[in-house]
Image (spheres, rainbow, N blue to C red):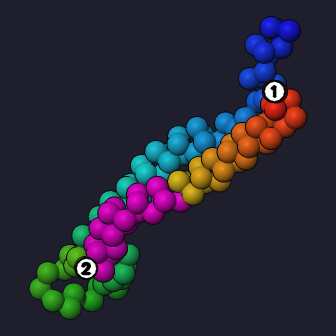
Amino acid sequence: MSEFFKLQPTLDLISFRRMVTPLIIQIIFWIGVVVVLIYGFSTIGEGVNGGPAGRAMSQMQSTFGTPPADASSGPHADAGEIFMGLLIVLLGPVAWRIYCELMIVIFSIHKELVDIRKNMSPEAKTP
């Protein structure tokens, strides 16, 4: 009988009574934070370098040999992209955290329901 209790955690895992997803969600959270920060900083870099439109205009001007519109032929900073990049860097990890916490809450509710079911079972009610 004692061997059964040693196997119980493994049986719970195999029969999906114990969830491994909350641990996986925590790992995915940190990977997601890194991805969001890289995306945010790359958006800021795009804005500082003039963004896709600024680079395309400079390339088109150099290709067709037309003189640039102003004295400086380099791309101009795009304030909108810089602002969006800052928002992504500041708010992106927070939004990602909220999403991951909601996923974990679903699994926590499942765990509590399993505990309630165990406590309500006839075997648990011993006088």
One can see residue 35 in this view: no
- Tag nearer the camera, 2 or 1: 1
- Quadrant in which the N terminus is drawn: top right
CA gap, disc 2 to disc 1? 72 Å
Nearer to us in this view, 71 or 81: 81
Q: Residue at x 34, y 61 (%)?
A: 89
**Mark 2: secondary structure:** helix
- Quadrant in which the C terminus is drawn: top right
Residue 50 position within the rendered picture, expressed as x and y whole percent measured from the top left: 28, 75
Residue 92 position within the rendered picture, expressed as x and y whole percent measured from the top left: 41, 62
Q: Which mark, residue 127?
A: 1
Residue furthest to the front in view is 127
Q: Which mark, residue 79?
A: 2
Q: Which mark, residue 56?
A: none
In the image: residue 28, left or right of residue 90: right
Q: Is residue 27 magenta?
A: no
Residue 68 against residue 22 in the figure, above or below? below
Residue 11 against residue 76 in the figure, above or below? above
Q: What is the span of residues highlighted in magenta in the rendered image?
A: 80-99
Residue 25 position within the rendered picture, expressed as x and y whole percent measured from the top left: 58, 45
* Residue contact between numbered discs 2 and 1, judged by CB atoms under 8 Å: no
Residue furthest to the left in view is 71
Q: Residue at x 43, y 51 (%)?
A: 33
Which image quarter: residue 66?
bottom left
